[in-house]
Image (cartoon, rainbow, N blue to C red):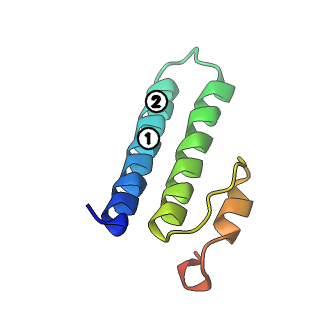
Amino acid sequence: MSEDDLRKRRALLWLQYALEDLTTAQALVSVTNAPARNTCLHAQQSAEKALKAVLIFLDLSVPRTHDLGYVASLFPEDWKM
């Protein structure tokens, strides 16, 4: 398997993790007594992992930070939202 294929598989794995966190956040929303902080934690983790999947896909360094704005700022200009 090529380096490019391995990188794409790694990015897809991170997207799968992001989807799992999103699913967990959605499940917590449906529980009326679930603490909001727990729901927000999983929602934030989902977004973070999805953003980092893009960096992996683009073969860029993935920082060890939870700052979504900073991670998004590392995208190339043509990937800006």
Structural crowding at the residue carrying mark 1, measured as other residues with C-alpha within 10 Å and reported as few (<14), some (14–19) or many (≥20): some
* Quadrant housing residue 8: bottom left
The residue nearer to you, when weighing 34 against 53, is 53
Q: Amino acid at mark 2?
A: Thr
Name the N-terminal-most of marks 2 and 1: 1
The residue nearer to you, when weighing 45 against 5, is 5
- Determine which residue is flagged by label 1: 17
- Determine which residue is flagged by label 2: 24
Give coordinates of residue 42: x percent, y percent: 57, 34
Mark sitting on residue 44: none
Alpha carbon distance from label 2 to label 1: 11 Å
- Say which residue appears at 41% left-offset and 36% top-offset: 20
Q: Is residue 11 above or below residue 25?
A: below
Q: Amino acid at mark 1?
A: Tyr
Secondary structure of the residue carrying numbered label 1: helix
Q: Is residue 79 above or below residue 63?
A: below
Give coordinates of residue 35: x percent, y percent: 65, 20
Secondary structure of the residue carrying numbered label 2: helix
Give coordinates of residue 80: x percent, y percent: 59, 78
**Quadrant location of the C terminus?**
bottom right
